[in-house]
Image: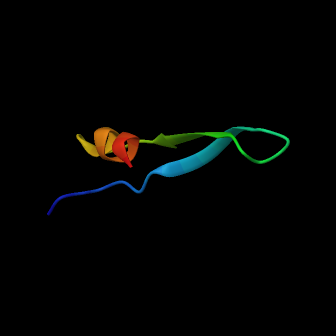
Amino acid sequence: MIEIEKPKIETVELNEDAKYGKFVIEPLERGYGTTLGNS
């Protein structure tokens, strides 16, 4: 059985007017970073 670890989502930076945000999502399975980056 494949063990998949649930990624943790962390807010690193938010702009005061809430139009910009920076998030860290880790760990990701191979290939999922590209999927998130494209979406």
Q: Residue furthest bottom?
A: 1
14 left or right of 38 in image: right
Q: Residue furthest right?
A: 16
Check the picture and name the quadrant holding the N terminus: bottom left
From the top left corner, tell me how far across and down residue 18 is, in percent.
77, 48
From the top left corner, tell me how far across and down residue 13 is, in percent.
72, 36
Q: Residue at x 38, y 46 (%)?
A: 36
Query: Is residue 30 visible to us here?
Result: yes
Colouring method of the image: rainbow
From the top left corner, tell me how far across and down residue 23 is, in percent.
59, 41
- Figure disc tally: 0
Foreground residue among 17 and 21: 17
8 left or right of 37 in image: right
Q: Residue at x 44, y 51 (%)?
A: 7
Query: Is residue 29 visible to us here?
Result: no
Foreground residue among 8 and 11: 11
The quadrant holding residue 17 is top right
From the top left corner, tell me how far across and down residue 37 is, in percent.
39, 40
1 left or right of 13 in image: left
Q: Residue at x 25, y 57 (%)?
A: 3
Q: Residue at x 85, y 41 (%)?
A: 16
